[in-house]
Image: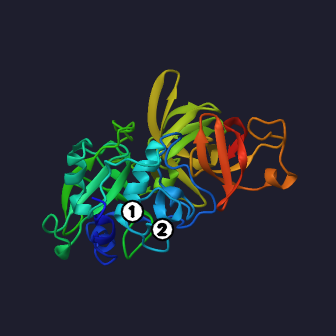
């Protein structure tokens, strides 16, 4: 497969994939394409990305440029924008590893075939962290289209899935909400390649239909929240709807991205448990605060060094400016974390001395 690196066709262009998704009624979200810090992804600890990777993230940089990606270079040493380059890097990033010979490096429409041949698990049911694969035209024929791949980063109770992806000739990173049968206009669903680390779907979202349904969806709102006061959880998105219960201050809630705009605030569609009973309803966002996600240190993380931290294995600290600068983690060996400024190694510390940004 090594020869395919320089001869692989790229998937259909902006006028193909992104236009096809829009024609099929998909909701496309375009987050920040070059965030200043490396985001942690969706949820509290899933490790799945729902925002654009930084331009210095090694999982999306070609091996020739010091990264881990083996797909074709698109811009300098970056393997983005390209659907296969993104999926390749995302699989490694999800698992927290630098290489896996089983991951395909061919046209997107042939990924499922190659993954199965390489011993990866595949199927027809979406699972968290899986690669979703589409085919356009015949296999092994890039002249009639090259297909498309993306990563399943959320699964909802109604069967909808949130797919993170990149598009050759188009957008570096975007997400799409797709409903069964997960169609892309003019392309055929091939199936899913499963990531060994993620073998089951996430907890399902509540059904969002019928009287009092939320009106909008935004993946960036998905996550854990805490009530900041005693507040009603209502049957619909306004005070005109009856209250199921009054949730005490400090009650944990889970939102799956559904909401209804209400001036400068929103009615968030959530699930909450109070006195041993589960409630599904709407809570005014003025009385919710996002729970702080547990951020783990991993290769590619952007970190600050805890003030006063010592160099790993030594009783020596760092220059004062080191504690006030953001660095990139480039290597982890047990409890030892190596951090860089660009390509320059600045030092090593214990994991507990790293503050993930």
Dividing the picture into quadrants, the one containing residue 235 is: top left
Q: CA distance from mark 2 to mark 1?
A: 9 Å
Question: In screen coordinates, is 109 left or right of 277?
Answer: left
- The label on residue 85 is 1
Question: In screen coordinates, is 155 left or right of 354?
Answer: left
Q: For the view shown, which residue lies furthest in the front direction?
A: 3
Expressed as whole percent of the image width and height from the top left, the position of residue 146 reads 23, 69
Tell me which colouring the rendered structure shows: rainbow
Give the answer, above or below, for where 71 lies relative to 203.
below
- The label on residue 282 is none
Q: For the view shown, which residue lies furthest in the top direction?
A: 276
Give the answer, above or below, for where 3 lies relative to 318.
below
Residue in front for this viewpoint, 297 or 177:
297
Dividing the picture into quadrants, the one containing residue 140 is: bottom left
- The label on residue 78 is 2
Expressed as whole percent of the image width and height from the top left, the position of residue 87 reads 37, 57
Question: In screen coordinates, is 324 left or right of 154?
Answer: right
Residue 183 in view in this figure: no
Residue under the point 25% across and 41% down: 121
Dots 2 and 1: beta carbons under 8 Å?
yes
Structural crowding at the residue carrying mark 2, measured as other residues with C-alpha within 10 Å and reported as few (<14), some (14–19) or many (≥20): many
Residue under the point 59% across and 42% down: 332
Residue 109 in view in this figure: yes
| Label 1 secondary element | helix
Expressed as whole percent of the image width and height from the top left, the position of residue 190 reads 19, 55
Q: For the view shown, which residue lies furthest in the right direction?
A: 320
Q: Earlier in the sequence, mark 2 or mark 1?
A: 2
Give the answer, above or below, for where 132 lies relative to 128.
below
Expressed as whole percent of the image width and height from the top left, the position of residue 72 reads 38, 68
Residue under the point 39% across and 36% down: 203
């Amino acid at each position: 497969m090594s020869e395919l690196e320089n001869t692989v066709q790229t998937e259909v262009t902006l006028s193909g994939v992104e236009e096809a998704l829009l024609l099929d009624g998909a909701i496309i979200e375009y987050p920040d394409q070059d965030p200043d810090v490396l985001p942690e992804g969706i949820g509290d600890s899933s490790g799945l990305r729902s925002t654009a990777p930084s331009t210095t993230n090694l999982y999306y940089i070609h091996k020739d440029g010091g990264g881990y990606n083996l797909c074709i270079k698109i811009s300098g040493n970056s393997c983005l924008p390209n659907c296969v380059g993104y999926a390749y890097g995302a699989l490694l990033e999800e698992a927290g590893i630098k290489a896996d010979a089983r991951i395909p490096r061919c046209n997107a429409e042939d990924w499922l075939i190659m993954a199965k041949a390489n011993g990866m698990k595949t199927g027809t049911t979406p699972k968290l962290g899986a690669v979703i694969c589409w085919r356009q035209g015949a296999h092994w024929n890039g002249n009639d289209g090259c297909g498309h791949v993306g990563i399943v980063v959320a699964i909802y109770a109604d069967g909808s899935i949130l797919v993170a992806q990149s598009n050759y000739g188009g957008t570096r990173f975007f997400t799409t909400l797709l409903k069964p049968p997960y169609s892309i206009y003019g392309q055929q669903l091939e199936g899913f390649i499963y990531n060994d680390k993620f073998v089951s779907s996430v907890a399902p979202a509540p059904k969002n239909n019928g009287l009092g349904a939320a009106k909008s969806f935004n993946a960036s709102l998905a996550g854990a929240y805490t009530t900041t006061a005693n507040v009603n959880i209502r049957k619909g998105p306004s005070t005109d709807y009856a209250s199921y219960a009054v949730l005490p201050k400090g009650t944990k809630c889970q939102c799956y991205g559904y909401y209804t705009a209400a001036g400068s605030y929103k009615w968030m569609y959530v699930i909450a448990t109070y006195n041993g009973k589960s409630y599904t309803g709407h809570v005014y966002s003025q009385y919710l605060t996002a729970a702080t996600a547990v951020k783990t240190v991993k290769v590619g993380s952007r970190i600050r060094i805890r003030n006063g931290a010592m160099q790993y294995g030594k009783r020596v600290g760092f220059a004062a400016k080191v504690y006030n600068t953001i660095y990139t983690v480039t290597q982890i060996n047990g409890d030892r974390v190596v951090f860089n400024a660009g390509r320059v190694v600045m030092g090593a510390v214990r994991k507990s001395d790293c503050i993930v940004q």
